[in-house]
Amino acid sequence: MLVHPTQGDSQMAFVRGAAVALIASGLMLSACSSVPFIGKSGDSRPAANAQQAGIGVNAYLWRATLDTLSFMPLLNADPWGGVVNYDWYVNPQTPNERFKATVFILDQRLRADALNVSITKEVKDASGGWTAAPVAAQTETDLENAILTKARQLNLANGG
């Protein structure tokens, strides 16, 4: 015995077909979106830091840090985390003291508060061993200012 579909069954089949088509088109359209633009306003201008897609911090601050402290031995550098560690440096004119530096680049924007320099100083004691010594407060600020100045110069030289 054949059962003829009722009007309710055909409407249900239509609704199922429409739901499948809607889900499929939603999945296809979602492939067109781009994750970096999620949560952005309608502003389609490129970001000011678009030139630095390869690293996680401001490229000018990064390059300026490496250039400004190039006289110190580089221990390690993390361009995605924004940390540059320098090993002990002994100035030949003052062989009884040595310095170590760590630079933290905290932002992708070229800003004064996007940079933090930490200096450690040691001096030789009478027995020839190294002991911790205070660093002049202005030393870290002077290094930060030197790095920022170099970063601004790099930015201007690049058309910024």
Image (spheres, rainbow, N blue to C red):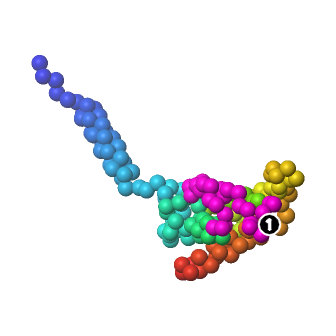
User: Tag 1: Cα neighbours inside 10 Å, few (<14), some, or many (≥20)?
Assistant: few
Residue closest to the eye, 35 or 89: 89
Question: Residue 46 location, x and y as percent?
Answer: 50, 69
Q: Is residue 76 magenta?
A: yes
Q: Decide if residue 153 is on the left or right side of residue 18.
A: right
Q: Position of residue 38 (x, y in %)?
A: 50, 55
Rendering coords of residue 123 (x, y %): 83, 57
**Quick check: 72 left or right of 120?**
left
Kind of residue at disc 1: Thr
Quarter holding the C terminus is bottom right
Name the quadrant containing residue 67. Answer: bottom right
Residue drawn at (50%, 69%) of the image: 51
Residue occupying image coordinates x 66% and y 58%: 86
For residue 36, above or below residue 44: above
Q: Where, quadrant-wise, is the N terminus in this rendering?
A: top left
Query: Per the image, is 35 magenta?
Result: no
- Under circle 1, the secondary element is loop
Classify 113 as above or below 17: below
What are the residue bounds of the magenta stretch?
A: 69-97
* Residue sitting at x 57%, y 58%: 79
Residue at 73 percent across and 62 percent down: it is 90
Q: Nearer the viewer, residue 9 or 37?
A: 37
Q: Residue farthest to the left? A: 1
Residue occupied by mark 1: 94
Q: Give the farthest residue toward the front.
A: 127
| Residue 4 position within the rendered picture, expressed as x and y whole percent measured from the top left | 16, 27
Residue at the extreme right:
126
Depth check, front residue: 131 or 126: 126
Does any portion of residue 132 appear in the rendered image? Answer: no
